[in-house]
């Protein structure tokens, strides 16, 4: 870099280096969509029996919802919906509908602030 000034971000004034070739841009100037590489070997060979999708606020109650998910038939997905309407609930409902549309067995449970039951409620299963 002798004789050259380091590149500086015009907005922040911070110096930066370009570590590789810039991604090719389309004729409209938009960057190509990002792609992900292959997952690590441990994830490629992992088999998720009964995955559970829960709000982060339920992490302290992990034992309860994990027991609930383990009580479901193999291959089922447990989705715990927050009790209040909002973006998180809408996203989880979309995930539930999408999984069911692709043939997955989905069980949804609405969390109302009380501790989760140990067994799935009757009628909570969606196929």
Image (cartoon, rainbow, N blue to C red):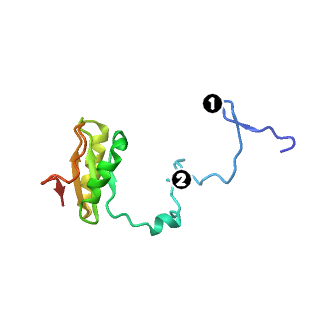
Compare residues 30 and 70 and report the one nearer the observer: 70
Q: Residue furthest right?
A: 2
Indicate the position of residue 50 as horizontal and vertical percent values.
31, 61
Between disc 1 and disc 2, whose residue precedes? 1
Q: Is residue 98 left or right of residue 28?
A: left
Q: Residue furthest top?
A: 12
Q: Is residue 7 left or right of residue 111?
A: right
Q: Are marks 1 and 2 in contact (CB under 8 Å)?
A: no
Q: Is residue 69 left or right of residue 2?
A: left
Indicate the position of residue 16 as horizontal and vertical percent values.
70, 40
Indicate the position of residue 3 as horizontal and vertical percent values.
86, 40
Q: Find the distance from the CA under tag 1 to the CA under tag 2.
A: 25 Å
Q: Is residue 41 above or below residue 88?
A: below
Compare residues 116 and 109 and report the one nearer the observer: 116
Q: Which tag is nearer the camera, tag 1 or tag 2?
A: 1
* Image disc number at residue 25: none
Q: Is residue 45 left or right of residue 74?
A: right
Q: Which residue is mark 1?
A: 11
Residue appearing at x 67%, y 54% in the figure:
21
Query: Mark 1, residues whose alpha carbon is within 10 Å: few (<14), some, or many (≥20)?
Result: few
Query: Mark 2, residues whose alpha carbon is within 10 Å: few (<14), some, or many (≥20)?
Result: few
Q: Which residue is mark 2?
A: 26
Indicate the position of residue 24 as horizontal and vertical percent values.
59, 54
Q: Is residue 107 above or below residue 113?
A: below
In terms of secondary structure, where does tag 2 sit?
A: loop
């Amino acid at each position: 870099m002798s004789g050259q000034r380091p590149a500086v971000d015009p907005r922040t004034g911070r110096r930066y280096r370009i570590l590789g070739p810039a991604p090719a841009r389309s004729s409209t100037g938009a960057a190509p969509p990002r792609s992900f590489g292959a997952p690590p070997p441990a994830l490629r060979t992992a088999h998720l029996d009964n995955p559970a999708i829960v709000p982060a606020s339920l992490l302290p109650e992990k034992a309860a919802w994990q027991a609930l998910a383990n009580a479901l038939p193999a291959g089922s997905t447990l989705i715990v919906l927050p009790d209040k309407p909002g973006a998180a609930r809408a996203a989880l409902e979309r995930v539930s509908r999408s999984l069911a549309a692709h043939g997955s067995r989905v069980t949804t449970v609405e969390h109302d602030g009380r501790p989760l039951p140990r067994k799935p409620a009757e009628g909570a299963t969606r196929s």
